[in-house]
């Protein structure tokens, strides 16, 4: 049985993603990581918000929640606190995670709760009208920035690291094998893991910014990407315009649900007392 038949709800196909969209590639990287991890469907939970990428939860044959815009991490936190034995993954888009959901994002990282968050970054609000997001590159056109954006975007791996995440990585839909490996490693981290997945949107973003087809955008990802190891050998000026991919940060810190369980144990009356 292929991983597609094993982990996807094939009766929900065909999917709604546009031709050339990279979301299916990221979804494929995810299910291959799950297969390698050996997690059962019963112990795996996938939570998503609203947006193109968040429709992925409907295609995945696990315990899934398709929640409200920006609140996926809040729902996931509730699941993980009440059922810490479950393997909880969160799928979000760039706007879903860092705009309306930005506050939940930094606090999930701060708590270092054992959740693996995958941010599908296509640089645009693809489903809801083509507005720019906090991850849209400066100068890019969008429906809300017809002459180009002025705002500096978040560097989301650095944001996650600064907020307290203990595993931070970035991959692309072009580097699908690497992306799957990063998700695999992030899932094994005991704490908050964030994997940014750079994915192409040839319709809402690519057309407006004259980036060509989905294949052209994949080639663009290849051309601008540089691994963490290679980037470490170059001076800052040589990294201008480059996309650093790979495992960016990996550390250890107390995990929230374990601390919570210890607190409950400490304050609960002992059997036979009271």
Image (spheres, rainbow, N blue to C red):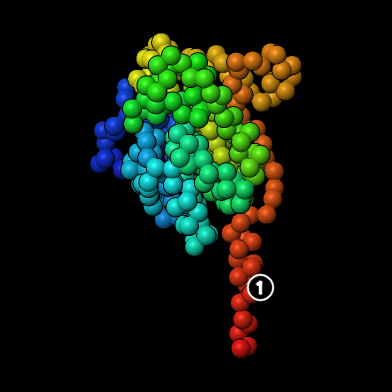
Task: Estimate the x, y position of residue 192 in percent, counting from the top left.
Answer: 59, 47
Look at 59% across and 29% down and name the residue there. 155
Q: Nearer the viewer, residue 199 or 40?
A: 199
Task: Estimate the x, y position of residue 1 in percent, counting from the top left.
Answer: 36, 41
Query: What is the count of numbered marks?
Result: 1
Q: Quadrant of residue 54?
A: top left
Look at 33% across and 43% down and name the residue there. 58
Report which residue position mark 1 lands on.
266
The reply, left or right, for residue 66 in relation to residue 113 is left
**Quadrant in which the C terminus appears:** bottom right
Task: Estimate the x, y position of residue 121 in percent, counting from the top left.
Answer: 48, 29
Look at 49% across and 24% down and name the residue there. 136
Look at 74% across and 19% down and name the residue there. 233
Res 113 visible: yes
The reply, left or right, for residue 35 in relation to residue 127 is right
Task: Estimate the x, y position of residue 264 in percent, counting from the top left.
Answer: 60, 70
The reply, left or right, for residue 267 in relation to residue 52 is right
Which secondary structure lies at badge 1? helix
Position above or below: 50 against 40: above
Q: Quadrant of residue 164?
A: top right
User: Mark 1 packing: few (<14 Cα in 10 Å), some, or many (20+)?
Assistant: few
């Amino acid at each position: 049985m292929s991983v597609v038949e094993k982990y996807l709800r094939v009766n929900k196909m065909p999917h709604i993603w546009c031709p050339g969209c990279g979301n299916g590639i990221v979804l494929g990287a995810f299910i291959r990581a799950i297969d390698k991890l050996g997690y059962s469907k019963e112990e795996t939970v996938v939570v998503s918000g609203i947006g193109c990428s968040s429709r992925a939860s409907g295609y995945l044959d696990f315990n899934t929640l398709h929640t409200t815009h920006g609140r996926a991490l809040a729902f996931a936190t509730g699941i993980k606190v009440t059922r810490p034995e479950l393997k909880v993954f969160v799928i979000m888009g760039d706007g879903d995670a860092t705009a309306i959901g930005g506050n939940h994002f930094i606090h999930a990282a701060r708590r270092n709760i054992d959740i693996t968050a995958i941010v599908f970054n296509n640089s645009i609000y693809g489903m809801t009208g083509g507005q720019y997001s906090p991850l849209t590159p400066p100068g890019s056109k969008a429906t809300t920035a017809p002459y180009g954006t002025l705002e500096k975007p978040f560097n989301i791996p650095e944001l996650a690291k600064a907020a307290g995440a203990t595993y931070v990585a970035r991959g692309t839909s072009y580097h699908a094998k690497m992306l799957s490996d990063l998700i695999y490693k992030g899932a094994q981290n005991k704490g908050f893991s964030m994997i940014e997945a750079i994915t192409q949107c040839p319709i809402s973003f690519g057309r407006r910014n004259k980036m060509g087809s989905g294949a052209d955008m994949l080639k663009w990802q290849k051309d601008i990407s540089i691994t963490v190891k290679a980037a470490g050998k170059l001076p800052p000026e040589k990294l201008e315009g480059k996309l650093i991919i790979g495992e960016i940060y990996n550390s250890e810190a107390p995990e929230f649900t374990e601390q919570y369980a210890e607190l409950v144990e400490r304050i609960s009356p002992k059997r036979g007392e009271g």
